[in-house]
Amino acid sequence: MSKIIQIKKTVVVTGGAGFIGSHLCRFLLAKGYRVICIDNMLTGNHSNVSDLKSNSDFIFIDHDVTLPFEISETVHYVLHFASPASPVDYERLPIQTLKAGSLGTHNMLGLAKVKKAVFLLASTSEVYGDPLVHPQPESYWGNVNPIGPRGVYDEAKRFAEAITMAYHRVHGMGTKIARIFNTYGEGMRKNDGRSVPAFITQALSSKPLTVFGDGSQTRSFCYVSDLVEGVYKLMLSSVNEPVNLGNPAEYTILEFAKKILKLTASSSKIIFKPLPVDDPKTRCPDITRARTLLKWQPKVAVDDGLKRTIEWFRKEAK
């Protein structure tokens, strides 16, 4: 009796050498997929995927997704995670950020269309801007300053969502939109400007923790393993409308800074600096849609995830 050969499905992950992208590549390989990782290393890092390069199911391609791109083999899923994704990135790389959201999304939708593949867009909670509704459900249209310094990222992702839905409606493509809220974990860049790596790095080096404004602005923090599982469930689902993925446990930035000090046993002080332009005052996901449609919600408690992340940063500092 002849053996039935199981053909592995292939997933393209753009931005696959970035923080979330690399965790996603590792997760998919563990699930038995072939992974084609595309990254031009604008904000990615080879060290994030160096351990994967010996895996015969992992292919790394150094390419800028804003430029035309073709793949000769069969592709089943295209997950578009390529974009600068922190305030220090899009302040330094505003045009590249806009191009990743517009040209990059267009090119990857084109690839998915040709391959008859499912397309998943890594969008962001930033599409809600400085929200006037709290917590933020997917039905909320947002409060965004299109010409402010954060507008290059906010509007790039809003455009990316619009063109993704247009391809779904016009071409009947299976498209998914993940609105990703603050995510943290091992592999974050020390200098990416976000509160988790900034506070941990400052605390471990006995430097003052920098809190912007009075620290009353709120954020929610989702551990990366939970986030990746949510992305995977969305990828396999029949849902085409945007879905919030994040942890609804909400903290003020000041509370969070104090939590980092406690978990690191650091003697660092907290200092305050002026609030950046258009910095959101609140940010917390309504994950009713994810709970209902994907049967997903975060499992890792914030303290547990932070302990793992802090330990990783300790090792990196040695």
Image (cartoon, rainbow, N blue to C red):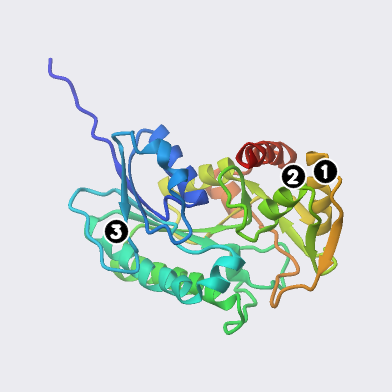
Query: Mark 1 and mark 2: span between their CA atoms?
Result: 7 Å
- What percent of the width, then of the height, locates residue 91? 57, 73
Q: Nearer the viewer, residue 318 or 56?
A: 318
Residue 165 appears in the figure: no
Marks 3/2 in contact by CB < 8 Å: the verdict is: no
Report whether 211 appears left or right of 59.
right
Between disc 3 and disc 2, whose residue precedes? 3
Assign the C terminus to one quadrant of the image.
top right
Residue 180 appears in the figure: yes
Q: Residue at x 60, y 47 (%)?
A: 291
Between disc 1 and disc 2, whose residue precedes? 2
Between disc 1 and disc 3, whose residue precedes? 3
Q: Nearer the viewer, mark 1 or mark 3?
A: 1
Amino acid type of the residue that numbered disc 1 sits on in the rendered structure: Ser
Query: Mark 3 and mark 2: span between their CA atoms?
Result: 44 Å
- What percent of the width, then of the height, locates residue 130? 69, 73
- The image shows residue 55, relative to residue 249, as above or below, that is above
Q: Identify the image quadrant of residue 104.
A: bottom left
Q: Secondary structure at mark 2?
A: helix
Q: Which residue is mark 3?
A: 112
Q: Residue at x 60, y 59 (%)?
A: 192
- What percent of the width, then of the height, locates residue 35? 33, 43
Q: Residue at x 74, y 65 (%)?
A: 282
Q: Which residue is mark 1?
A: 266
Amino acid type of the residue that numbered disc 2 sits on in the rendered structure: Leu
Amino acid type of the residue that numbered disc 3 sits on in the rendered structure: Ala
Q: Secondary structure at mark 1?
A: loop
Q: Which residue is mark 2?
A: 204
Marks 1/2 in contact by CB < 8 Å: the verdict is: yes
Query: Mark 1 and mark 3: span between their CA atoms?
Result: 48 Å
Tell me if mark 3 has few (under 14), some (14-19) or many (20+) residues whose alpha carbon lies within 10 angstroms of its own.
Answer: many
Q: Nearer the viewer, mark 3 or mark 2?
A: 2
